[in-house]
Amino acid sequence: MSSSLAVNIRNLRLSPAEQPVLRTFQRRNMGDIPGIDNLSAQQRRAMDIVSRVLPFKTNQYICEELIDWDNIPDDPMFQLTFPQEGMLSPSDFAKIAKLVDDKAAQAEIDAAVRQIRLGLNPHPSGQVDLNVPQLDGEKMEGIQHKYKETILFFPSKGQTCHAYCTYCFRWPQFVRLDDLKFAAKEAAAMVDYLRAHTEVTDVIFTGGDPMVMRTDVLRRYVEPLLAPEFEGLNIRIGTKSVAYWPHRFVNDKEADDTLKLFDEIVSAGRHLAIMAHYSHPCELETVIAEEAVRNILSTGAVIRCQAPIIRNVNDSSKVWADLIRAQVSLGCVPYYMFVERNTGPKRYFELPLSRALEIYSGAFRQVSGLGRTMRGPVMAATPGKVLVESALELAGEKVFALRVLQGRNPAWGNRLFFAAYDETATWFDDLRPAKIDPSGGGNGGGGNWFFD
Ligand code: SF4
């Protein structure tokens, strides 16, 4: 099918009055949420308290089509987008609740909220210090050069999302811990940086969610990358819009222009990868979600799917097997199962690495080879992307076999190393080098890591 024909077929030609418009709900208009009456007074109060500290945003599509209100509070999409009391420690929750009950001055509440936020490890894994690049001695705001061949670009207009995931590791961007916010003002800085760094093959647009931007704004960032000088560059767009607002690719006012832009990117010879964040199979089950996938694929873009494994949302092999099967049958490529980062309400969502590995292995065994392209569980930790490959016994010692998928130092790529098995460890920082490590991953004596 030629791309122009594809565009015509996709165009549902809804009149502007018929086009769906995103309606979002936050703490200030919580009472308008479709389904809110299903919550008890205690649940609503908990939402009010927690959402003073952690960002909260949902929308009408999630509430009306994805949440099963007969299954509250266990419903995975409810857990994914609505604040829960357990997301704050009991003492933090009690502190804010008391200030609210006592009708404390707003400044006093704000100070307490800020103090709690700063205690939640707002910028994990050295993101602030380790990855911000420089050009001509100037810090490049809005760009992270994480791995040799890949840069992350944070367009300033894409620093929000169609809804917020309660576990989001980028939560500081949404609550205005401003000193920690990444945002680029101009595409020009990125272009200059790419000219100076020809080793970069991939630009990842990220946020927030870049697909909250109007298409003409997104175009301003993308178009310079289609010039012949950037031939061979791969363009990736990290987004949860496919799950939270698939109308963007079907019938809202931006849909046609978005798909046309995707067509142009592919026609210019660029590999366009939509890095789609799908947390649960229900996000792929609605008619509009399926249509969004089909429309994106018809442009020639590839959809690669990734999500963290999260307690209360997708912590079973069956859910992951169903998710992977749904992705494959729609023509998407399963890509990563991440481990949720050590930030924000981590305690509420975390799973031991040993359990995450079991769930991954259980799902892996249930799907065909087409689904086994998903790698996991993977931690985006300080040394880079680290895969928990397996748990095994080595010379009498129980260990985790770990592999560096992407290293901050390119020389670490694909390096296998071993950590002492720890059934309770939930993140890389909880692990210690194995005593016996023939790969030289540790120092052979259970001391430092090779990258320390
Ligand atoms: S869509 Fe991504 S950036 Fe936005 S809240 Fe969810 S995890 Fe965070």
Image: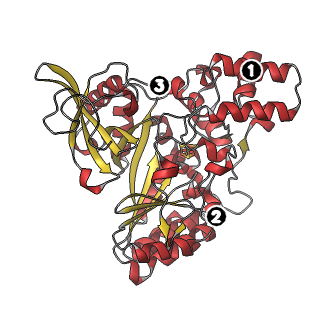
Of pointers 3 and 2, the one earlier in the residue sequence: 2
Q: Amino acid at mark 1?
A: Lys
Residue count near mark 3 (Cα–Cα under 10 Å), binned few <14, some 14–19, many ≥20:
many
* Viewer-side label of 3, 2: 3
The one nearer the camera, 417 or 174, is 417
Is any part of residue 192 visible from this angle?
yes
Q: Amino acid at mark 2?
A: Arg
Q: Amino acid at mark 3?
A: Arg
Instruction: Decide if residue 278 is on the left or right side of residue 450.
Output: right
Residue 95: assigned label:
1
Please provide percent x and percent y for residue 234: 38, 66
CB contact under 8 Å: marks 1 and 2: no
Q: Secondary structure at mark 1?
A: helix
The one nearer the camera, 377 or 163, is 377
Please provide percent x and percent y for residue 324: 35, 39
Q: Would you say the beta carbon of the disc 2 residue lies within 8 angstroms of ligand 1?
A: no
Quarter for ligand 1? Answer: top right
Residues at marks 1 and 3, CA–CA distance in whole angstroms: 26 Å
CB contact under 8 Å: marks 1 and 3: no
81 lies above or below 156: above
The residue indicated by pointer 3 is 311
287 lies above or below 40: below
Q: Secondary structure at mark 3?
A: loop
Residue 214: assigned label:
2
Q: Secondary structure at mark 2?
A: loop
Residue count near mark 2 (Cα–Cα under 10 Å), binned few <14, some 14–19, many ≥20:
some
Is any part of residue 5 visible from this angle?
no
Residues at marks 1 and 2, CA–CA distance in whole angstroms: 40 Å
139 lies above or below 229: above
What is the quadrant of the C terminus in the image?
top left
